């Protein structure tokens, strides 16, 4: 029996973004947004911008959205499209398996993170496995809100390190446009759709892979971000509305939570922040990721920002951004490239991991 200590390395990544980009002016055209947005209050908050008095309400909403969230547009599944969260996950998963130079049949375990699966039972991992052609591979779905992708990565790491599995597919997907409250402009402006995936494989400890001990924690502050079990009627079934509260308190707490998680994950790795090439954070709000960058005193480009054009697709933002980074879309990769993933989600659920990656 081989007792060589194991770690988990990233063998391949993939992502899927719906082709539809909805900019802020298009979002403002939705009745619930237009009727509930305080144009004059927003105009007053933009008083230092030149020509603000001559802007149309839609233009004010656009300027306000960029100022408050950093989002200019978001990717969404069109309202008349029947695409599901699982559909997006399958597309991202196929890319990750291909990038890992594996076949779906090589997978030992599927771990899926989502707050918006199309079905409660069977769980989303079962559906994805069947669609990939591996219906007998075990798997389960977890919900850690926007930290879910990293939670699933850490779970995959634990399964591999314990010897339970050797090739694990991690998938995160959400179609938040399906549960967004379009009567609440402050919430609706944030959310988007997408999926990210990674294949983790067993590697000898000391090779590239997870470093140190990953970090997870939660503070259970329910009121600041939750899915309320009331909402629109759709075929006589209530669809819950996504609610965001807390305002500036959430921004500050999110920055502190992600910094704490990231620093905790880096402890014991032998690395300093100067050794970290990229920080891949959850894309909740540009002010949060810029605050993370400032707090960690990292030069521009090392904390990756993608929210401007993609919006906040919950946990999938980490998977999508990680895929782009490892495919060289945010700059050349060193050999090895050192990464820190960090996220905070509903309930201030936080997670982080330090990983070294060798381009192959």
Image (tube, rainbow, N blue to C red):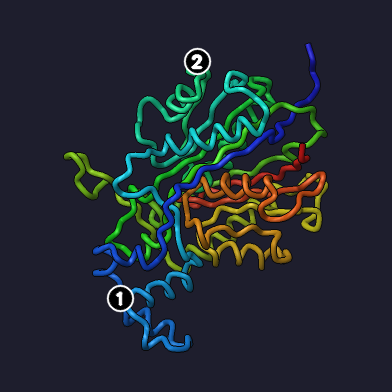
Q: Residues within 10 Å of mark 2 (few under 14, many from 20)?
A: few
Can you say which quadrant of the picture contains the C terminus? top right
Relative height, residue 237 to residue 201 (above, below): below
Q: Which mark is residue 251?
A: none
Q: Is residue 185 left or right of residue 293?
A: left
**In x, y percent, where is residue 286?**
54, 64
Displayed quadrant of residue 55: bottom left
User: Is residue 249 in sight in this rendering?
Assistant: no
What is the residue that sits farthest to the front in this orientation?
19
Q: Secondary structure at mark 2?
A: loop
Q: Which mark is residue 136?
A: 2
Question: Is 98 or 42 nearer to us in this picture?
Answer: 98
Q: Tag 2 or tag 1, which sits nearer the N-term?
A: 1
Question: Is 173 or 347 nearer to us in this picture?
Answer: 173
Q: Is residue 95 left or right of residue 267?
A: left
Q: Which residue is mark 1?
A: 38
What is the residue that sits farthest to the top in this orientation?
1
């Amino acid at each position: 029996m081989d007792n060589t200590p194991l770690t988990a390395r990233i063998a391949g990544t993939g992502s899927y973004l719906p082709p539809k980009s909805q900019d802020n002016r298009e979002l403002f055209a939705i009745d619930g947004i237009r009727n509930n947005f305080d144009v004059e209050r927003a105009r007053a908050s933009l008083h230092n911008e030149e020509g603000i008095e001559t802007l149309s309400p839609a233009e004010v909403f656009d300027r306000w959205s960029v100022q408050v969230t950093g989002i200019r547009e978001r990717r969404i599944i069109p309202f008349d499209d029947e695409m599901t969260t699982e559909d997006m996950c399958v597309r991202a998963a196929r890319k990750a398996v291909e990038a890992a130079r594996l076949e779906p049949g090589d997978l030992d375990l599927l771990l899926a993170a989502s707050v918006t699966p199309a079905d409660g039972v069977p769980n989303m991992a079962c559906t994805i496995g069947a669609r990939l052609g591996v219906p007998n591979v075990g798997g389960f779905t977890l919900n850690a809100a926007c930290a879910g992708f990293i939670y699933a990565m850490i779970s995959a790491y634990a399964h591999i390190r314990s010897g339970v599995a050797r090739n694990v597919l991690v998938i995160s997907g959400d179609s938040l446009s399906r549960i967004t409250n379009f009567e609440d402009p402050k919430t609706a402006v944030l959310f988007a759709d997408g999926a990210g995936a990674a294949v983790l494989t067993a590697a000898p400890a000391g090779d590239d892979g997870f470093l140190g001990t990953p970090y997870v924690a939660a503070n259970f502050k329910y009121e600041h971000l939750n899915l309320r079990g009331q909402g629109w009627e759709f075929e006589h079934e209530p669809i819950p509305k996504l609610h965001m509260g807390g305002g500036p308190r959430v921004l500050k707490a999110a920055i502190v939570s992600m910094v704490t998680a990231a620093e905790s994950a880096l402890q014991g790795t032998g690395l300093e922040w100067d050794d970290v090439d990229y920080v891949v954070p959850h894309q909740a709000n540009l002010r949060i990721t810029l605050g993370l960058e400032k707090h960690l005193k990292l030069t521009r480009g090392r904390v990756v920002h993608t929210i401007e054009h993609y919006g906040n697709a919950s946990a999938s933002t980490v998977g999508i951004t990680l895929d782009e980074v490892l495919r060289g879309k945010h700059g050349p990769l060193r050999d090895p490239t050192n990464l820190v993933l960090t996220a905070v989600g509903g309930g201030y659920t936080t997670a982080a991991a330090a990983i070294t990656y060798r381009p192959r």
